[in-house]
């Protein structure tokens, strides 16, 4: 036994090696996920001398296992003895950063970036920076793409001669023969620019940016657009016009719709980065062109930015620019042939009313809102209705009420249940804005109709909707308008509708208060305890449990307790269970 005890310290590594060589991927994956435990058992010295070399040698596994390994190694600093030994983690991570599977490489780069901060400046130059160079000049494109993500983390902390080498490596990768490498370099261009000194941003980064933005591959050009935002924020205003704008103008008119889409998608950020003067002179015409683009995806991305773009315009000329340049394009988009474009516009157009004020909204925007409320696409109508509060603040909702009603009714009866569900969610908001008289006259019947919808999710949402309406309009309104109709459903031949009565009572009892619950709702619930359907009976028990806290103790003892006792002796097992649960929760035993 003594001999066996002596080998105890080797046991964890032996198990790991066995499991890592096992044919079952799941076992190998589990052992990788337990790496930190094994490293703790081995101690820092043996983790460095045995475990890490072993892991470095075994990197030829399934991607899933390698991904777990790359993630684990990023958290290994303390397990190899702290920051002074953190460089021991570089060999396995370097190997992982060159594998074929992108997800594994990305995770390895993420872990390398994480541990780079734990290197001292000396270690960074001795160990980390040579690794970046090796990756950057690797034969396979996989290692060169990984290198792109590592330049920015080591650049700020190395000497000026090493900095010059890093810049040279980055320049080489930006003009690499392989599109995947150029794409990786373009995606990190903005991040790298942020750590560079301004003189090198002007001398190096701008020329790289211009080259990447006119690359033959559209996947590279669109990533250059993203970098444009970062570069524009770094440069002084006077240099923007000469260094950045020509490239940006070119991107906004690129022959590939993907690049134009990226410009539209990043438009608000670009606008903030270049400032008000360039926005007025350059971005306004560019935005107009994007709103009129021949590709629907580009128009939709630009339409999404309309409100944000208008908000960020310089105040002194905001209204003029919107009225003369933006609004004509918006008017055309309202009747666009593509529903995604119309839907994108409908989700933001209401926000223009707060920017343009009451008179312009009534004269120019109101006709557009009304047209969209009659659109054949339900998403467009829904987006308008869901943003009504913006208009309500400016012109009041009465202006829209006549057109609103047919749109709401159509959506409320739409064949797609998700559309019906969405309109229910806006009902309390609409009710608050339209007022109780309008609601009672026009919308009350809709709310009641939803309670008997054939889709359960609609019935459930309609029940919650009633509670919110009662909170808005008060218990007296509920007693006169809602409660009689809900209680009337207790005699419905369809048991699902009878159950909806119980769900409504559960939801309404608290909002309506003790008097209405005791006087009007409780008798109906008690009467339903004799229902033929067991599902209804056990829901009676659940309802009594729910409304019990609202009732006074006399009522509980005299009326509720006998009914629950009767249900507790029911033949159906579920009815018994819920009745007994209600008795114990209400402490009636």
Image (cartoon, rainbow, N blue to C red):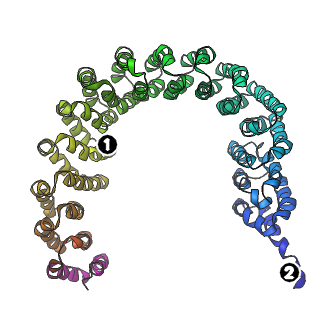
Q: Which quadrant is home to the C terminus?
A: bottom left
Q: Which quadrant is home to the N terminus?
A: bottom right
Residue 388 vs 251, above or below: the answer is below
What residue appears at the point 23 percent right and 56 percent down from the top-left corner?
467
Counting other residues with Cα less than 10 Å from the Cα at mark 1, is it few (<14), some (14-19), or many (20 or more)? Answer: some
Residue 283 vs 305, above or below: the answer is above
Indicate the position of residue 60 as horizontal and vertical percent values. Answer: 80, 51
Residue 179 visible in the snapshot? yes
* Residue marked by disc 2: 5
Indicate the position of residue 424 as horizontal and vertical percent values. Answer: 27, 47
Q: Secondary structure at mark 1?
A: helix
Residue closest to the eye, 46 or 165: 165
Residue 342 vs 442, above or below: the answer is above
Q: Specify which label sits upstream in the sequence, 2 or 1.
A: 2
Residue 240 vs 479, above or below: the answer is above
Magenta stretch contains residue 254: no
* Extreme-right residue of the structure: 3
In the picture, measured across the screen, residue 72 lies left or right of residue 57, that is: left
Q: Which mark is residue 471?
A: none
Q: Secondary structure at mark 2?
A: helix
In the picture, measured across the screen, residue 495 lies left or right of residue 111, that is: left
Residue 540 visible in the snapshot? no
Residue closest to the eye, 416 or 120: 120
Indicate the position of residue 180 as horizontal and vertical percent values. Answer: 71, 31
- Picture quadrant where residue 474 is located: bottom left
Q: Main secondary structure of the magenta part?
A: helix
3D distance between C-alphas at marks 2 and 1: 69 Å
- Picture quadrant where residue 254 is located: top right
Q: Which mark is residue 419?
A: 1
What residue appears at the point 87 percent right and 80 percent down from the top-left corner?
4
């Amino acid at each position: 036994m003594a001999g066996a005890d002596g080998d105890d310290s080797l046991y964890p590594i032996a198990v790991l090696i066995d499991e890592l060589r096992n044919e079952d991927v799941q076992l190998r994956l589990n052992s990788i996920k337990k790496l930190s435990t094994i490293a703790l058992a081995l101690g820092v010295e043996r983790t460095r001398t045995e475990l890490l070399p072993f892991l470095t040698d075994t990197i030829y596994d399934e991607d899933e296992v390698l991904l777990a390994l790359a993630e684990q190694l990023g958290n290994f600093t303390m397990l190899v003895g702290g920051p002074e030994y953190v460089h021991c983690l570089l060999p396995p991570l370097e190997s992982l950063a060159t594998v074929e599977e992108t997800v594994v490489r990305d995770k390895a780069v993420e872990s390398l970036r994480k541990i780079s901060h734990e290197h001292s400046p000396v270690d960074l130059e001795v160990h980390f920076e040579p690794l970046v160079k090796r990756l950057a000049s690797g034969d396979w494109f996989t290692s060169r793409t990984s290198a792109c993500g590592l330049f920015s983390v080591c650049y700020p902390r190395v000497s000026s001669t090493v900095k010059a080498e890093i810049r040279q490596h980055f320049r080489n990768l930006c003009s690499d023969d392989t599109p995947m490498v150029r794409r990786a370099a373009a995606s990190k261009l903005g991040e790298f620019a942020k750590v560079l000194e301004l003189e090198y941003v002007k001398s190096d980064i701008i020329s790289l940016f211009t080259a990447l933005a006119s690359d033959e591959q559209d996947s590279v050009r669109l990533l250059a657009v993203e970098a444009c935002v970062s570069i524009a924020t770094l440069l002084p205003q006077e240099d923007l016009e000469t260094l950045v704008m020509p490239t940006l103008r070119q991107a906004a008119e690129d022959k590939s719709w993907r690049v134009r889409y990226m410009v539209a998608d990043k438009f608000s950020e670009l606008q903030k980065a270049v400032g008000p003067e360039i926005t007025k002179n350059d971005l306004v015409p560019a935005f107009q062109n994007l709103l009129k683009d021949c590709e629907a995806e580009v128009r939709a991305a630009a339409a999404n930015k309309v409100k944000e773009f208008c908000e960020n315009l310089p105040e002194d000329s905001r209204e003029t620019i919107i009225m003369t340049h933006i609004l004509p394009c918006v008017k055309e988009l309202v009747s666009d042939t593509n529903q995604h474009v119309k839907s994108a516009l409908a989700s933001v157009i209401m926000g223009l009313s707060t920017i343009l004020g009451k008179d312009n909204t009534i004269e120019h925007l109101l006709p557009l809102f009304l047209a969209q409320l009659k659109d054949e696409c339900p998403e467009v109508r829904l987006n308008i209705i869901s943003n009504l509060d913006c208009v309500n603040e400016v012109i009041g909702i009465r202006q829209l009420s006549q057109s609103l009603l047919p749109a709401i009714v159509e959506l409320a009866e739409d064949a797609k249940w998700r559309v019906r569900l969405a309109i229910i969610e806006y009902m309390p908001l609409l009710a608050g804005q339209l007022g109780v008289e309008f609601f009672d006259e026009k919308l009350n019947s809709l709310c009641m109709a939803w309670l008997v919808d054939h889709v359960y999710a609609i019935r459930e949402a309609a029940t919650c909707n009633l509670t919110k309406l009662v909170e808005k309009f008060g218990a007296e309104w509920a007693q006169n308008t809602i409660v009689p109709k809900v209680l009337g459903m207790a005699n419905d031949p369809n048991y699902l509708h009878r159950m909806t009565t119980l769900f409504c009572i559960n939801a309404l009892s608290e909002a309506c208060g003790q008097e209405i619950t005791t006087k009007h709702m409780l008798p109906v619930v008690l009467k339903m305890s004799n229902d033929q359907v067991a599902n209804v009976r056990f829901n009676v028990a659940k309802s009594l449990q729910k409304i019990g806290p609202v009732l006074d103790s006399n009522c509980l003892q005299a009326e509720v307790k006998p009914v629950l006792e009767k249900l507790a002796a029911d033949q159906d097992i579920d009815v018994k269970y819920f009745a007994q649960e209600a008795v114990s929760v209400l402490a009636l035993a």
